[in-house]
Amino acid sequence: MKRESWAIDQLLPWTQLNNVELNGIAIAEGVHGSGIFATRDFLDEEQILMTVPQQLVLSLENVWTARGAILIILLLQLTHNTTNGTVGVANPFCQYLKFLPREIPLPTFWSEDERALLVGTSLEAALEAKLKTLDREFDFLRENTTDIEWCKQHWWSAGSELSIDDWRYVDAAYRSRALDLPGTGHATVPCIDMANHAAGEETSAVYETDSNGNAILVLRAGKRVKAGDEVTITYGDEKGACEMIFSYGFLEEDRALAKELFLDLDIPDDDPLRMAKKAASKSPPGFRLFARDETVEWESDFVWLLCINEEDGLDFQLRQTSEGETQICVCWKEREVPDLTKFRDLLEKDSRWDVFRLRAITTLQSRVEAQLVRLNRSDEDVRKIQEYGDIRADPEASAVELRDLEETLMLTAYQSFEISKHELFGSDAVQAYLRRVQSREADDGDDFS
Ligand SMILES: C[S@@+](CC[C@H](N)C(=O)[O-])C[C@H]1O[C@@H](n2cnc3c(N)ncnc32)[C@H](O)[C@@H]1O
């Protein structure tokens, strides 16, 4: 689809027409694309810098459904623009979309060589999954709209241009511009979405909902901003390096830590409960590593299901719901576990808790080790791509830094798993368990002999 673009200095008449109030700020071109800049000095005032009327806030509340609906609405508005208004009804959003960047630098738009720089990082799997989902969604859109006359004409017939890149564009626009607006929820707010990111003390403004449901941008308490300074918000100081690149396409210049990463886990093929565990699990199949103080901690509901077995007391039962559907239930020592997020709490009460913990930590440590091997083995290929590949400077810089930051986080995690393992090996429960296993193995050996 051929998207029309308007220069950002044309945005002012649009804000006036649509009752967006700008108080001492202007939206203009800066170093990170468009941004918001102060046009006067602000000295320690919690001043409202911008008010966006409620009806312009594209939120779940306003559209009544999830991400898919917002993407479809964005796509319809783009179609309205490219068909000279033949499709859909003109609304302020159609014009506003012309002020968005023509290209959004998210990894879903990276070339094959650029994506190959991510091998061994947690972004590799996340990006692969995202691209597959986008392909699936686009196929679904095509299958379900080809029989609608205007869609056939403007999206799918020969010469009409809706492509997977258009779908990736609306997804990237949504992902990089949506806010979690306090009092409203996930929303796309025109004009406030022109605010660039700065973390920590550098963040100069916050966004919220006023008592009338309007979205407002407010100067942070105690912040001084001079005329000409950029007005910034935070996209989430706690976000990991992977998520920053995935959702916004950049890493902050002064970032020193990956902060967090997610690695997947798979249930081994020889686990007799594999299918039941997969069917019963509702949590993401993996674990999150995150930096805390000088060390790295982890979080996972899935790992408990992975490393507990039938002989420990795990079982599954099929139940019929009142709607007639069959549901799989997890049972621990013959009692149903209604909420799998609480399974860990039940295990913690068991006398073999240290044994379970040791199993979990060993599983996580070997997964981290495998990821480190994958990362290190790809270093040589990455160097070749840097030398000969078809890559742009920004994706290269982000990918190389991500490799570095995630390697440090994983090495620290590996070490801290090692320390925990040593501690757990010394526990009475683990020693008693090992003695039982050894004597069982000896008995098995006798059987064979
Ligand atoms: C919500 S939009 C902000 C407005 C955007 N600059 C524009 O031109 O429309 C988010 C995008 O701005 C860019 N951006 C924001 N803060 C940045 C920063 N600190 N460094 C680099 N790029 C940034 C990234 O491309 C990001 O995906």
Image (spheres, helix red, strand yellow):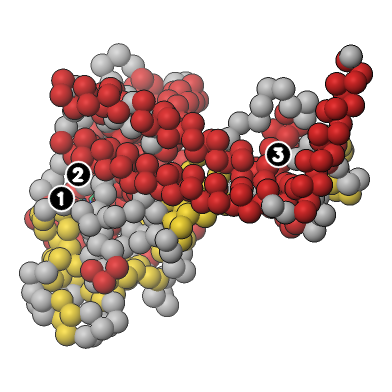
Q: What element carries label 1?
A: strand
Mark 3 vs mark 2: give the one in front. 3
Identify the residue shown where x is 26% and y is 43%: 401
Identify the residue shown where x is 29% and y is 82%: 221
Identify the residue shown where x is 13% and y is 46%: 6
Q: Can residue 50 be seen in this view?
A: no
Ligand 1 is within 8 Å of the C-beta of the residue at disc 2: yes
Reply above or below: 48 against 304.
below
Mark pair 1, 2: CA separation: 8 Å
Q: Residue 280 carries which label?
A: none
- Viewport quadrant of the N terminus: top left
Q: Which amino acid does label 1 sit on?
A: Gly
For disc 2, the neighbor class at 10 Å (few under 14, some 14 to 19, many from 20) is some
The one nearer the camera, 399 or 63, is 399
Q: Residue 101 carries which label?
A: 2
Reply above or below: 325 against 250.
above
Residue annotated with mark 1 = 33
Q: Which amino acid does label 3 sit on?
A: Cys
